[in-house]
Image: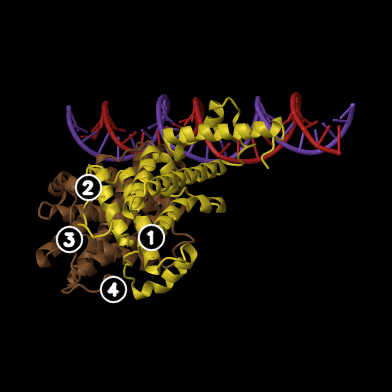
Chain colours: A brown, B yellow, C purple, D red
Amino acid sequence: MSTIRGARERARIEVTAAIKDEARRQLAAEGAAKLSLRAVARELGMVSSALYRYFPSRDDLLTALIVDAYDAIGEAAEAAHAKAAGQAAVHPARWMAVACDVRDWALAHPHEYALIYGSPVPGYTAPQATVGPASRVGQVFIGLVRDAHVAEGLAVPSLAAELRPEATRMTADLAADLPPAVVVSLVSAWAQLFGLISFELFGQFNRVVEAREQLFRQAVHELGRSVGLLDGRSAGAAGTRI
Amino acid sequence: MSTIRGARERARIEVTAAIKDEARRQLAAEGAAKLSLRAVARELGMVSSALYRYFPSRDDLLTALIVDAYDAIGEAAEAAHAKAAGQAAVHPARWMAVACDVRDWALAHPHEYALIYGSPVPGYTAPQATVGPASRVGQVFIGLVRDAHVAEGLAVPSLAAELRPEATRMTADLAADLPPAVVVSLVSAWAQLFGLISFELFGQFNRVVEAREQLFRQAVHELGRSVGLLDGRSAGAAGTRI
DNA sequence: CCGTTGTGAGAGCGGTGCTCTCGCTTGAGA
DNA sequence: TCTCAAGCGAGAGCACCGCTCTCACAACGG
């Protein structure tokens, strides 16, 4: 698979990478809306039409960046989980660690975050290639909760009757070994976690919240409880810092 | 103030409104990124340069649409609150009604929602004029919780020590008559609520969640509890539908 | 009545995404 | 080893974009 096929193939791979790198640079500098094929080509000393040999359209270049961004934030989450698990931290602490590292990644890469968790671009519909990388962060949280379930059990939250069919469907799709009520809470918590990050990053907290990290930690702690993570052995005060 | 000043002024008001209407139409059809001054002018039978008599730049037109969108969703929230309060519903039910109507507005106006709660446009920084309208939805929730506090009290959540200074600051800014811990929870709940809506609207729930309204209701119910709203007189099961 | 002021039209600037054609180079198969 | 299709970059060009400037006209206030 990874055999060296020849100078041509090698050059193609290198040029493709260079285009993505420059595009990512412009993305970080100016945001997705100002990403310009011509500007990328100019910076690379190419002519704009040559770029179309590598990406059929601007949207395809954006798709590549989207996939990369999903992979990057997914990798950050996986690394945070691995590190926290390696330190044998209790599960609420792991939950907190992963959430904080996801937030840190978002703060460090605001435009890439906006690309994947912000408003979708106009006519653009996410191609199939993005669904795998897009699920990596969620998979980390699922794995974390699964570990907690196996290791020390969960305080299974209650589940409205009307939500039961959907809960069983989601459970079959996402984590068949978890209680349906936990899966529902987990999906809700997932959306709410990114709601906190998005509000901070997109400026809704301007002039409202100053101590954003502390607020985030408090909310994430509460979200961990809502999915059933047990606070160590005995239940401490709800608001204690982990 | 509202005297009829003459044909010129009148025409200006009408043309300005027509431009905004057409722009909103294009916004709904194609999204903010594809909103084109030339296209708006073309549709209105004007020449593009004439538009600059009414809006100094494309960004100014966008700002006007942003303010309108904030006002629209704020108005929806206020109407929902007034209606629910008029029906003398218990406070968790009012909370649910407002949240659901906000979500309904978002589903009905996805592009306008994306304009105000999605990724900010590249170089654009929200002008001062937007902060008033932007706070209307939040004010509704604050008022609702204040009513509950006065009428039947709140189950004040716990508050981490490290968050106390920020909590008192926010309380002074937002709702001096509410317990600081409630204000913190309320701000968190606010962000998390829009996180749920954004995930649904921006496609993160695709292939994951089907019964979105039910999931939303369950999460909103839980958020209401998290800010201290009391479940009627006695505490029912956590997951019961309101 | 006259001059100021608001207005629309038009041309034009530099930019964009994208297409097409034209040669050159590369590399695999005859 | 030669040949020829495929890959590639350059360039011209299309239709669009936001925005600026000038010019002529119409409305309006003094």
Same subunit, tags 4 and 1: no
Q: Chain of mark 2?
A: A
Identified by mark 4, the residue type is Thr
Q: Dots 3 and 1: beta carbons under 8 Å? A: no
Q: Secondary structure at mark 2?
A: helix
> Which residue carries the number 1 mark?
B151
Q: In terms of image quadrants, where is residue A213?
A: bottom left
Q: Chain of mark 3?
A: A
Kindly check if marks 3 and 2 are in contact, taking CB atoms under 8 A apart as contact: no
Of badges 3 and 2, nearer the viewer stands: 3
Task: Point out residue C14 in the picture as x, y percentages from the top left corner.
Answer: 58, 40
- Please, what is the three-letter code of the amino acid marked with disc 1? Ala
Q: Chain of mark 1?
A: B
Q: CA distance from mark 3 to mark 1?
A: 39 Å
Residue beneath disc 2: A132
Q: Chain of mark 4?
A: A
CA–CA distance in space, label 4 to label 1: 29 Å
**Mark 1 residue element:** helix
Q: CA distance from mark 2 to mark 1?
A: 49 Å
Do dots 3 and 1 share one subunit?
no
- Asked if residue A35 shows in the view, the reply is no
Specify whether disc 3 shares its chain with disc 2.
yes
Quadrant that contains the N terminus of chain B: top right
Give the vertical position of B152 relative to B75 (above or below): below
Q: CA distance from mark 3 to mark 2?
A: 20 Å
- In the rendered image, residues at marks 2 and 1 fall on the same chain: no
Residue B44 figure quarter: top right
| Residue B186 placement (x, y as % from top left) | 37, 60
Residue tagged by mark 4? A240
For disc 3, the marked residue is A145
Query: Which of the two labelled residues, at mark 2 and mark 4, occupies the earlier sequence position?
Result: 2
What whole-number distance in Å separates the C-alpha atoms at marks 3 and 4?
Answer: 20 Å
